[in-house]
């Protein structure tokens, strides 16, 4: 129940709220008059607020993860309900930006909960399964769109309630007397983890740059993925089905987790980012070819979700005792890249068209795959005294790779 509800929180905060913006964008533009360039800035602002949430999550995930879960569900749910009630583009934009903060809070909280509640030998796969919740969330958003469009407001209402309900279920399923006594839920003695030191940042430097660039290259699909299909003449069922295919690809990470969790992080990164590059290129080049567009979206969804899992594995290889902090920092870099990429795509999508905009995104992502294959993980110095805020009973010696079943 714990892993299922954890996956559900990621599905709600990411798939149903944060990343569903691009799914409903054409209908919102029609009803509220939101311009294409303004949509890019809204997506950029949502990414920026996500980063704020992730920084807060990084700081407090080790001591109050369940509090963060509650706040994440409330913020994401409230943001979705605010979008549903928006009377104009400004109100919609504000609610969308605020709602994205919930996803930033959810990820580090769940990394910390999995680390504390799942046996060590199963943590690699458990992290991959929970992180794969984005895919089912996107599928659910697509199903809502198929059933309800053009009534996008009702779709956001359902998304908001889903976030609130699944957050409550996770709070119940993650309660543990052992953790409650040690993680700050029942004690004020526990302090947040110290900030990573210079050796930690040096060990993560290349991975941080790759995450930043990957976010920028992939942003075009999240913002304009359905829009490019609509502009190519795809009817609503086809354009929404492509979004469902994107989510199905992300959900497939649950199936492939046993395989990917046994690979080194660098290999995971190279394979998954290459898949994203192919998906972006195909979607932007031939959006009018429905079978190709559907496959491209599925490949993109799998690659993107699995790449975020590769980032978790990579920071775990570098410094397993601070994997929660590393996840937060790398996800912040990823989404900061998305913020810049969304703004840039919004600025050039009209003068360059979808072909040029998606082509640029594919090029950036392909470069990430090539450079990632050349990066080798190096462990951070262990003498800094900065440790991952996990239960003190953890064994001192741990594998440098994320554990698989």
Image (spheres, grey):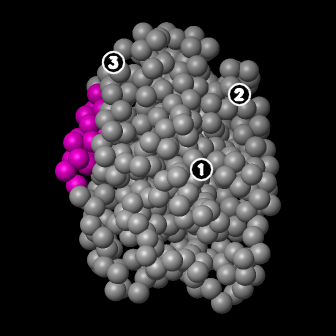
Residue 167 highlighted magenta (yes or no): no
* Badge 2 or badge 3: first in the primary sequence: 2
Q: Residues within 10 Å of mark 3 (few under 14, many from 20)?
A: some
> Between residues 285 and 200, which one lies in front from this camera angle?
200
Mark 2 to mark 1: distance in Å? 22 Å
The extreme bottom residue here reads 189
The disc at residue 285 is 3
Labels 2 and 3 touching (C-beta < 8 A): no
- The residue wearing badge 1 is 130
The relative height of residue 47 versus residue 381 in the rendered view (above or below) is: above
**Label 2, on which residue?**
144
Residue 278 point in image, percent of width and height: 33, 28
Q: Name the quadrant containing residue 378.
A: bottom left
* Pair 1/3: label in front: 1
* Element on which disc 2 rests: helix
* Magenta span: 359-375
Image location (x, y in percent) of residue 323 = 46, 66
At x 35% / y 52%, what residue is drawn?
A: 265
Q: Looking at the image, which residue is at 36% across and 85% down?
A: 384
Q: Do we see residue 82 in this rendering?
A: no
- Element under label 3? helix
Q: Majority secondary structure of the magenta segment? A: helix
Residue nearer the viewer, 129 or 95:
129
């Amino acid at each position: 129940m714990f892993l299922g509800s954890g996956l559900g929180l990621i599905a709600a905060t990411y798939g149903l709220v944060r990343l569903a913006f691009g799914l409903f964008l054409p209908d919102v533009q029609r009803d509220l008059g939101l311009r294409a360039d303004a949509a890019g800035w809204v997506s950029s602002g949502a990414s920026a607020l996500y980063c704020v949430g992730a920084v807060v999550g990084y700081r407090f995930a080790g001591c109050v993860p369940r509090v963060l879960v509650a706040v994440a569900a409330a913020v994401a749910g409230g943001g979705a309900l605010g979008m549903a009630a928006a009377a104009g583009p400004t109100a919609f934009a504000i609610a969308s930006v605020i709602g994205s903060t919930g996803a930033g809070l959810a990820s580090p909280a769940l990394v910390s909960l999995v680390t504390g509640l799942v046996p060590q030998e199963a943590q690699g796969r458990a992290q991959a399964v929970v992180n794969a919740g984005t895919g089912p969330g996107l599928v659910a958003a697509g199903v809502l769109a198929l059933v309800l469009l053009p009534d996008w407001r009702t779709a956001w209402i359902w998304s908001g309630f889903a976030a609130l309900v699944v957050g409550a279920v996770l709070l119940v399923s993650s309660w543990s007397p052992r953790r409650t006594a040690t993680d700050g839920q029942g004690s004020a003695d526990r302090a947040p983890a110290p900030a990573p030191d210079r050796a930690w940042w040096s060990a993560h430097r290349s991975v941080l740059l790759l995450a930043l660039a990957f976010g920028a290259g992939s942003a075009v699909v999240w913002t304009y993925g359905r829009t490019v299909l609509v502009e190519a003449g795809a009817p609503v069922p086809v354009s929404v089905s492509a979004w469902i295919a994107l989510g199905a690809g992300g959900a497939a990470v649950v199936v492939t987790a046993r395989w990917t969790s046994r690979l080194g992080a660098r290999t995971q990164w190279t394979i998954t980012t290459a898949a994203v590059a192919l998906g972006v290129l195909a979607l932007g080049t031939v959006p009018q070819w429905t079978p190709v567009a559907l496959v491209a979206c599925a490949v993109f969804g799998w690659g993107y979700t699995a790449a975020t899992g590769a980032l978790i594995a990579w920071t775990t290889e570098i410094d397993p005792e601070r994997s929660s902090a590393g996840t937060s920092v790398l996800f912040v870099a990823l989404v900061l890249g998305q913020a810049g990429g969304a703004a840039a795509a919004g600025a050039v999508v009209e003068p360059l068209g979808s072909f040029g905009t998606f082509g640029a995104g594919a090029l950036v992502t392909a470069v990430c795959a090539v450079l990632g294959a050349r990066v080798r993980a190096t462990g951070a110095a262990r003498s800094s005294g900065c440790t991952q805020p996990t239960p003190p009973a953890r064994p001192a010696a741990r594998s440098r790779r994320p554990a698989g079943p």
